[in-house]
Image (tube, grey):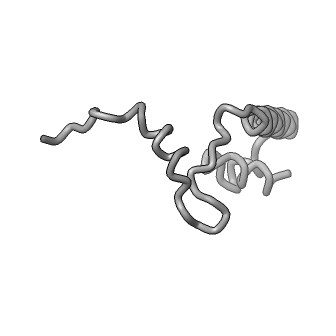
Amino acid sequence: MIHQLIFHGKGGYDYNTVYNMPIWLRKFTYSEIKDFYAEEKKSVENAGKSGASNKNLVNSDGKVNTPAFAEASKAYKGKTSYN
């Protein structure tokens, strides 16, 4: 559990802090981090299922899919900041 808190805490906890943390607080923090990552995983899976963001701009052979690229770049046409 100590390793999980240090690793998934993303730099928020060091070994001494987690080791000296009261057990009830350590369990609570572990539970909160676990819930956060479960929610994040669910939202990533739901985003992957939506068809709107699944445009392939590069084919499986590594070549650019020209019609899809042209369609995706229409929103940026004429929005350059240089002259």
Q: Is residue 31 left or right of residue 53?
A: right
Question: Does residue 25 appear in the picture of this structure?
Answer: no
Tell which of 8 and 39 is nearer to you.
39
Query: Which residue is at the far left?
Result: 83
Residue drawn at x 87%, y 38% is 27
Position above or below: 45 against 8: above
Question: Does residue 36 appear in the picture of this structure?
Answer: yes
> Residue 47's spot in the image, x, y percent?
72, 34
Tell which of 8 and 57 is nearer to you.
57
Q: Is residue 29 left or right of residue 77?
A: right
> Residue 23's spot in the image, x, y percent?
86, 40
Residue drawn at x 76%, y 48% is 5
Tell which of 64 and 47 is nearer to you.
64
Q: Is residue 70 left or right of residue 65?
A: left
> Residue 75's spot in the image, x, y percent?
41, 31
Query: Which residue is at the far bottom?
Result: 61
Q: How many marks?
A: 0
> Residue 8's spot in the image, x, y percent?
72, 49
Residue drawn at x 58%, y 66% is 62
Tell which of 55 and 28 is nearer to you.
55
Q: Quadrant of residue 31?
A: top right
The image quadrant where one finds the C terminus is top left
